[in-house]
Image (cartoon, rainbow, N blue to C red):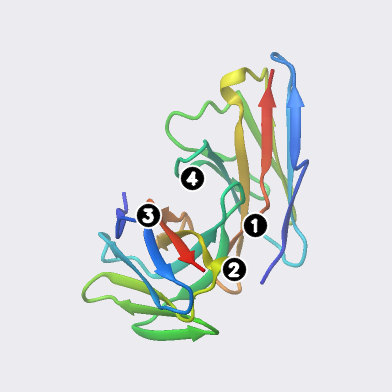
Amino acid sequence: GAVVSQHPSRVICKSGTSVKIECRSLDFQATTMFWYRQFPKQSLMLMATSNEGSKATYEQGVEKDKFLINHASLTLSTLTVTSAHPEDSSFYICSAFRTQTDEQYFGPGTRLTVT
Amino acid sequence: QKEVEQNSGPLSVPEGAIASLNCTYSDRGSQSFFWYRQYSGKSPELIMSIYSNGDKEDGRFTAQLNKASQYVSLLIRDSQPSDSATYLCAVTGGNDYKLSFGAGTTVTVRA
C-alpha cells in the first residue's frame, strides 16, 4: 500500500502557542488530503479537505482561523493549530487520496497535548 | 449526508474461527467501499477496497458487495489474536472523495 507520514508523532505545547503538523505522501502525489481529529473512544471526525494549490474546505463547526491548512505541494499538507487550548488536545490524523487507486491512506497520526 | 451503519459489537470469536462484519449504507449513489482496521491508539489502516458487486479476496480477508441491497461485508478467516481491532466500514461516491464512516465494530479474537 501507499505510505503517508506525519510529523511530529507527539507534541506537548503550552496553552496559547501554535503547533504545526506535517502530512506527507511518500510514494505518490496527492492533490487532495484530509485532516481528521479523534478523541478517545470516539469516531474519526473530518475537519477539512486540503486541496493542492487552493484553499482548504472546512467542515461545519471547524474554525478555519484556528486550524490553518496549507497544501503547498502535491506531497505535503500542513495543519497549524493556532492559540492552542487544552480542549484542542486530541489525536490528529491526516489522509491522502491516491487518484490511481481511488483509495485513501492515513498517516500514523499526531497526538497533541496542550498544557 | 451518507449514512453508514455497522453491526453493533463487540464481536468476540475464538482463534481460527471466521469473523463476519456487516455494513449497510444509505446513499444508493455510493461508488467505492472500503474496510479499515484501527488498532487502539493508532490510525486507520486500509485493508480492503471493493467497487463492483461480488466478492473480493485478499489473503484471509474477503469483502462482499451487493449494491442492490446496499450492503458490504467483510469476512476474516482463520482469525488470529492480531486481528483484534476496530473495523471501520467507509463509503464514498462524490467528487469530493470524502469518506463516510460507520461507527466501527470492535473484534476480539480469543486465543
**Circle 3 residue:** B102
Q: CA distance from mark 1 to mark 4?
A: 21 Å
Q: Amino acid at mark 4?
A: Leu
Quarter-of-image position of residue A35: top right
Same-subunit check for callouts 3 and 4:
no
Q: CA distance from mark 2 to mark 1?
A: 8 Å
Q: Kindly check if marks 3 and 2 are in contact, taking CB atoms under 8 A apart as contact.
A: no
Quarter-of-image position of residue A93: top right
**Circle 4 residue:** A44
Vertical placement of B59 versus B103: above or below? below
- The residue mark sitting in front, 2 or 4, is 4
Q: Kindly check if marks 2 and 1 are in contact, taking CB atoms under 8 A apart as contact.
A: yes
B4 with respect to A110 (left or right)? left
Quarter of the rendering occupied by the N terminus of chain A: bottom right
Q: Earlier in the sequence, mark 2 or mark 1?
A: 1
**Circle 2 residue:** A99
